Amino acid sequence: MTSHLVTGIGELVTHDERWGGPLQDAALVAEDGRVVWVGRAADAPPADRATDLGGAAVVPGFVDSHTHLVFAGDRSAEFEARMAGTPYTGGGIATTVAATRAASDDELRARLRALADEARAQGTTTLEIKSGYGLDVEHERRLLRLAREVTDETTFLGAHVVPPGIDRGDYLALVTGPMLAACAPHARWADVFCEPGSPVAFDGDEARAVLGAARDAGLGLRVHGNQLGPGPGVRLAVELGAASVDHCTFLGDTDVAALAEGDTVATLLPGVEFSTRSPYPDARRLLDAGVEVALASDCNPGTCFSTSMPLMIALAVREMGMTSAEAVRAATLGGARALRRDDLGHLRVGARAHLAVLDAPSHRHLAYRPGVPIARGMVL
Ligand code: NIG
Ligand code: FE
């Protein structure tokens, strides 16, 4: 076992309340992949090897708790149409399903790995990855097998939409029966796109059936809810004890109250509002109500083709009323809570030694320098 001292940290965000905020002139020691010491550089213990970051700021590695990285095809024309005013409805998902089914494992793997590398290069050290572009038993299982090559945080999203050519009731029976049975061994979580206003997604009763079956199969629960309009997704997620409800763009007072009382994280995905020209969710309202908020990329070919957590932080600060400190917390500790992981998203002793190293003196530069690649992931 070798110990690794990282020193020359100009500012260190640990999320350890005992420090009362970011530490200046800090150092950290990792051993066997875990943080074993944190403090002032001047007090650092000796270690087997040392890296001097020359004054860089360090925050916990970003925990991107919502992505759809296994897919094929291109939907840039759909993006262009949305920029010209065409609303997003979820109808384009079928295009990606067709392209994904037609792609070989190696083609899907190559793109998945490239996107995971792209995320790491921008400071992301943990990725959740969903299926949802296979939508039959074999292809959903295949996408989860591929996702598992990259992360343990895999999510079965057979209930993304009802694919063309199959009756709704028959598809629900498949998703809650044979498809779930085939996919559960490859997944930690199950998710459902609950959007009663959409002809392709699932209403509250259907989502309840999907989540109930997934829970019985031993999976943790997550929900795509309240993305395109008000609906039952948020309240259902809280009622069923889901780890996270994601999007939360259209919330009523009862949704906010339910989130404040329950232990379901509200995961906000501002890249989606950016890329679909939609109103941003009201993060301030959630934070002021005491809700645990996470930020994630939702990287997917339809609503947000970006892996950049620094972009999500910049949008949250510029458009959603979050301070830089709140946005960084949501992109790290918030994401970890959305995955129910207490070893990620912070840099207290015992945490995984996953860092985002910033080519900047302060975490504030993540929002202050939008579009500039100042963050990189470092796993010790
Ligand atoms: O999280 N809203 C549902 N699913 C994805 C978009 C999928 C797509 O359009 O390909 C989302 O936004
Ligand atoms: Fe999504």
Image (tube, helix red, strand yellow):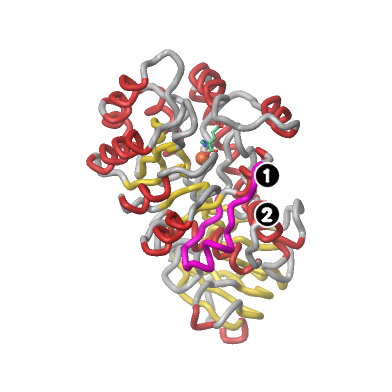
Q: Which residue is identified by label 2?
A: 315
Which mark, by number, is residue 335?
none
Q: Position of residue 192 (x, y in %)?
A: 40, 38
Above or below, 222 relative to 10: above
Q: Position of residue 218 (x, y in %)?
A: 25, 44
User: Three-letter amino acid code at disc 1?
Assistant: Phe
- How far separated are the C-alphas under marks 2 and 1? 8 Å
Does residue 53 appear in the picture of this structure?
no
Q: In the displayed image of the protein, which residue is found farthest to the bottom?
A: 43
As for residue 252 lying within the magenta part, the answer is: no
Q: Residues within 10 Å of mark 2 (few under 14, many from 20)?
A: many
Q: In the displayed image of the protein, which residue is found farthest to the front?
A: 253
- Left or right of 140, for residue 74: right
Which mark, by number, is residue 274?
1
Query: Which one is nearer the viewer's eye here, 247 or 214?
Result: 247
Q: Magenta residues?
A: 278-296
Q: Residue at x 44, y 54 (%)?
A: 255
Q: Quadrant of the N terminus?
A: bottom left
The quadrant holding residue 264 is bottom left
Query: Which one is nearer the viewer's eye here, 377 or 362?
Result: 362
Above or below, 17 relative to 288: below
Q: Are marks 2 and 1 in contact (CB under 8 Å)?
A: yes
Q: Residue at x 47, y 46 (%)?
A: 128
* Of the image marks 2 and 1, the number of the one nearer the N terminus: 1
Q: Position of residue 104 (x, y in %)?
A: 51, 20
Above or below, 40 relative to 35: below
Q: Residue at x 48, y 24 (%)?
A: 105
Q: Position of residue 78 (x, y in %)?
A: 67, 26
Q: Residue at x 49, y 50 (%)?
A: 65
Does residue 260 appear in the picture of this structure?
yes
As for residue 291 lying within the magenta part, the answer is: yes
Helix or strand or loop: what does disc 1 sit on?
helix
